[in-house]
Image (cartoon, rainbow, N blue to C red):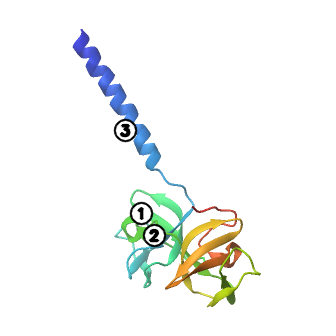
């Protein structure tokens, strides 16, 4: 009688452990991610049999995941265009796009701090962290701070560590 009880206990423990582990893997929707390869097909539906609506041709472009279905993600870009892509075409690396005509990359989290470089609308930046309405970013060899509201690819009150 003890052997069957051990088996049942092991089975219950294993089921509980795997359900907790799987729950921890779930990600939030919506969320920002970026495109992994240089060429990504955006389809009209979640599957390879749906027609391709357009093709993204820039690796690292930030997009917003707005719906998940199996291994497919419905994404939205800075222009509000939407399409379905396979999850393997996305990576969790955070990037932002300058949405204003021109902004300054500052040495500190202050408009009064020295500026390093001018950034124009459409420039894609690596997001390193965001706090207090400022984001630390990197572009090529430059690393500094920009106002969070000037970027698309991070939510207005989001904190990145």
Quadrant housing residue 109:
bottom right
Question: Which residue is situated farthest in the top direction here?
Answer: 1
Q: Are marks 2 and 1 in contact (CB under 8 Å)?
A: yes
Q: CA distance from mark 2 to mark 1?
A: 6 Å
Quadrant housing residue 138:
bottom right
The reply, left or right, for residue 75 in relation to residue 159 is left
Question: Which residue is situated farthest in the right direction here?
Answer: 112
The reply, left or right, for residue 7 in relation to residue 112 is left
Point 68% across, 87% down: residue? 115
Residue named by callout 1: 72
Q: Earlier in the sequence, mark 2 or mark 3?
A: 3
Image position, residue 104 (x, y; %): 68, 86
Q: Earlier in the sequence, mark 3 or mark 1?
A: 3
Task: Say few, some or many: other residues with alpha carbon within 10 Å of mark 2 (under 14 / 14 to 19 / 20 or more).
Answer: many
Q: Are marks 3 and 1 in contact (CB under 8 Å)?
A: no
Residue named by callout 3: 18
The answer to whether residue 2 is above or below residue 21 is above
Residue in the foreground of this view, choosing between 116 and 139: 116
Image position, residue 3 (x, y; %): 22, 14
Residue in the foreground of this view, choosing between 55 and 140: 140
Point 27% across, 18% down: residue? 6
Q: Secondary structure at mark 2?
A: strand
Task: Say few, some or many: other residues with alpha carbon within 10 Å of mark 3 (under 14 / 14 to 19 / 20 or more).
Answer: few
Q: Earlier in the sequence, mark 2 or mark 1?
A: 1
Numbered label attached to residue 43: none
Q: Secondary structure at mark 3?
A: helix
Q: CA distance from mark 2 to mark 3?
A: 29 Å
Residue named by callout 2: 84
Residue in the foreground of this view, choosing between 92 and 146: 146
């Amino acid at each position: 009688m003890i052997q069957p009880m051990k088996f049942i206990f092991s089975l219950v423990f294993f089921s509980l452990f795997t359900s907790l582990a799987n729950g921890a893997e779930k990600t939030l929707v919506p969320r920002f991610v970026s495109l992994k390869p240089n060429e990504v097909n955006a389809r009209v539906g979640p599957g390879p049999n749906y027609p391709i609506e357009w093709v993204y041709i820039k690796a690292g472009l930030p997009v917003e995941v707005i719906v998940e279905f199996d291994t497919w993600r419905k994404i939205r870009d800075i222009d509000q265009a939407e399409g379905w892509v396979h999850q393997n075409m996305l990576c969790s690396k955070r990037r932002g796009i300058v949405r204003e005509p021109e902004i300054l990359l500052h040495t500190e989290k202050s408009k009064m701090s020295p500026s390093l470089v001018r950034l124009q609308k459409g420039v894609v930046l690596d997001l390193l962290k965001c706090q207090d309405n400022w984001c630390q970013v990197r572009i090529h060899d430059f690393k500094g701070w920009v106002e969070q509201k000037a970027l698309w690819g991070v939510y207005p009150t989001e904190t990145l560590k």
